[in-house]
Amino acid sequence: MLPDATVVRSILSAAGVHDAPAEETSLGLVCRVPGSGAPGVLAALRESELDFRILVDMLGTDTGEGIEITYHLRSLSRDEELYAKTALPYDGDLHSVWNTFPSALLQERETAELFGLKLVGHPNPKRLFTTEGLEPLLRKSVPQRSVEEVRQR
Amino acid sequence: MAIDRFTGEHSVAFIRSEQLFDLARRHSLWYLAFGIACCAIEAPMSASGPRFDFDRMGVFFRASPRQADVMIVAGTVNRKMAETVRMLYDQMPEPKWVVAMGACASTGGPFREYPNVVLGVDKVVPVDVYIPGCPPRPESVQYGFIQLQEKIKAQTEERLAARRHGS
Amino acid sequence: MSPALVIVLRILAALGLMLANGVVLIYMLRKVLGHLHLRLGPVHVGPKGVFQTTMDVLKLLSKEDVWPSGVDRALFYLAPMVVFVPSLMAYAALAFSETWRITDLATGLLYTFAVLSIVPIGILMAGWASANKWSLLGGMRAAAQQIAYEVPLLLSVLPVVMIVGSLNLGDVVLAQDGMWLGFLPKWFVLPQLPAFVLFAVAGLVELNQTPFDMSEAESELVSGFATEYSAMKFGLLFLSEFSNSFVISALGVTLFFGGWLVPWVSSEAIQPIAPVVFMIKVYIGIFVMMWIRGTFPRVRIDQLMQLGWKWLIPASLGWIMVTGLVMKLWQLGPQVVG
Amino acid sequence: MTDPRDLVTDVGLLAEGAHDPGSPPAGIRRAPTGVDGLTTEHLVINMGPQHPSTHGVLRLIVEVDGEEIVAAETSLGYLHRGIEKLAETRRYNQLGTLMDRGDYVSGMHGEQAAALAVERLLEVEVPPKARWTRSLVAELTRIASHLIWYGTFGLDTGAMGQFLYAMRDRESILDILEAISGARMMFNYIRPGGVVADLPAGIDGRIRRFCNGFDAYLDEHHALLGGNEIFQARVQGVGEIDADTALAFGLTGANLRASGFGWDVRRERPYDAYPQLDFDVPVGTTGDAWDRYMVRMEEMRQANRMVRQCVDGMPEGDFTAKVPKVIRPPEGEVYASVESSRGETGVHVVSDGSDTPYRYHYRAPSLFACQVLEEILPGHLIADAVMLIGSLDIMLGETDR
């Protein structure tokens, strides 16, 4: 299930990310990559001997300091899973990885829209779910409707 | 004029034919095949299935809004969908009715706190019958349609009564 | 009675028959489909729901007649009539019995096909005038379909015409009177089975019936050419569809199933109830169409075209050849010389 | 009066960068080929959100040349109702209610994923009876969901009967599920730690009766639709997705298996009672609509088999582990996935130690099926588009979330 952390580290350093930590958490093996380097690192992981061919999932999290993007990779030949995390500032640039993983096409649009990020390098960087003029809804700073507002209707 | 008694707005012929048309409207409620969310599985789908069979009471689906009488709003309406719902409502010919099916279409339901969700479809189109439930069982929807029939009947009678008193 | 009055009465009879047919057939469709699908169909309005269609028609009469913005008003207005009137006219040549006909045309078969082929023009008009892309696609499909299937439909009935030697529908029926080998009814369906199959397929396409309902194709084109039509304009389109299925079924019965004749009963004895027998046969034909409608998926437009051009036309031409050869070799001339 | 010809246009919503014919991006997506501007024009057609066969509110903007699609774009969000945002104010026990409404046809699987994730955070041991019950209801739900797919797929091809026959069987499953959980669709039955109530007395007899009948009914369903030559001609060779494309676009479930890649969460990442159950994973070869049809039909048969095994092998014991009423899992992050009717339904929970999730993400398999549409639609006819959407079994509740 868990890939070898040292191998992951060596792949990351070969891809130009030198002091990248790869550690085991409750989630599994998590490595951290800088925001603009994500496409290159993910491509390197895909092409490496670990063979992470599938982007299972991708999500953003509002950590309070910025947006953290989590890429969930899966290697089918070795049956291993790896999580790559990227920290982005609010309103930062989300670099598209769709050239490596086409399955990120809609997910990136969704994440960029709901967290208010700017999509870079995406072939169709439009809004996906909401209409124009809505705030980035999944940020913690955007409140849900209050009970009073719902009651007044 | 004497002839007015037979052809005018208060004549027996006019009133009777109007009653006849209302009877027809009541028993031929074609709904727009238009499901939004979870409720769509219960109302247009299960309801037209063998067990509940809305066709028994003449409730039948049409794919085009131009031929529909009733719009069942089955599901959560959000800001993006609201425009479409309104457009479909405008495309339906008069007389038309709207059934808000389920908690979401009535008030926003379990999703009411999300800013993208419209708090009830009645913000967008006038609603005639609200059906509670999440999702309502097909039986509830059937009851809702019976209520809609009653409502059409009551409207006829009101109109007739107003005319009788007016003349 | 003056001849003019007779003509008017006959036209009214045709109109009445057509409207009654439409209403009865829609009710029948809903009941048949209902029972095929483990349901009941309408039951609430009137006993067994018999007034359901009446209610639907009355409701359609009282609905708002919507003129969508952007329609070609003249064509949009004309199209339902262009669809409706030919299907009414098609009743004229049908032979319900030796005496029960709207009119006795020497070229009845040709006339009926000619009139029916106007219907797709109306559908194309409706599709074009609606200013709706789905309608446009539906109209185009109807046109393509008509061009492809008009030919095999006509060719498929030619062998029968060759045997009978007449285009009069009454003559075709009379030619089927009698027995083969003393027990087989002399219906053309037996020697002409391939022609009947060709006729059935091409007829279903001509009617826009499942599995060939390309121009309405609910799951693809919303309601096809009828998408923008509301109220009684839609009602007319709907009624004419059912009335056409009556006409095609009547043609099938006349050409292949001995019209009003009943096997093992002499044609004189059947005369008093001939129209009833004819109607029953026609309704059985329509029931089969509904059966197909309730069960079959729809073919794709390119498959339909391929079937038409690559299979049906060569097959019907080939069958004409076979029939002609057999007639020549065994000296089977036309039995009724009109 | 507008001339209908004005509606015919070659520039539409598609002309916004994505489909610039000048630079097809990296060979992944086919760009519009461009036609002779003098003689023909492309027509941009809008399918949905109100269209009889978009299965809900999928909006598909297709550019057609005659009836052939040259480019397609999906537009989602007509059912975006913030399940992920709302989950941040729901307690862990209440997550099932949201998951039910996500993939509303197979609600049990969503609940199962949420419960598995929370259990993984809490590190509780689920008693065997709860695990077997979960597998039982999950497989029943899979049959119910596939029946809806089968029926609507029939409707897409223009056949009405299949839908109503499927609804007949679905009603009997819903009766069983209603007896177990109390609801027809929104069960909220699987909770962290186990299930909410024990199986009612005498339910095993009812389930057995259903299983025995369903084997015959399934043959009938297959004969009715799959045995029809018109249907075969409609689906065979339509919408072929090879295994590489399927993997690249993240397809899972029956859609991936139809392409010849036998990945099944139940087998690769076993959960609940699946390690003890005996089942086959059907795998297709070419990945066309016919393979997807066959895989799903076979899955129903396997699900029926598993339901029987679950009823036979149901252990005695508690139906739930001891979990507090208000669950406060330790800080951490966890991903759990189940094999739902549509593929790998995953739940990614970030906990900050409070009684509500800090971040709750829901991996919706239909979303991935949606994005493959844009890739494979070009070259097909409009009628095929309908079949493709039908065969991919897209559920808009979970794509939009």
Image: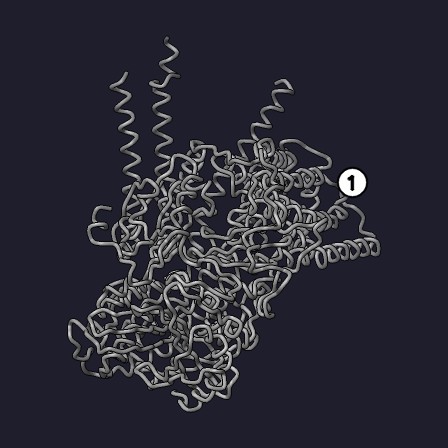
Establish if D229 lies above or below C8: below
Q: Position of residue D256 (x, y in %)?
A: 49, 75
Establish if B90 lies above or below A60: above
Q: Nearer the viewer, residue A77 or C110?
A: A77
Q: Position of residue B25 (x, y in %)?
A: 37, 36
Which image quarter is the N terminus of chain D in?
top right
Q: Residue at x 71, y 48 (%)?
A: C157
Please identify the quarter of the rendering in which residue B6 is found.
top left
Mark 1 lies on a secondary structure that is loop
Establish if B103 lies above or below A120: above
Q: Residues within 10 Å of mark 1 (few under 14, many from 20)?
A: few
Q: Nearer the viewer, residue D259 or C95?
A: D259
Q: Position of residue D295 (x, y in %)?
A: 48, 74
**Amino acid type of the residue tagged 1 in the rendering:** Val
Q: Nearer the viewer, residue C108 or A66?
A: A66
Q: Position of residue B8 (x, y in %)?
A: 37, 16
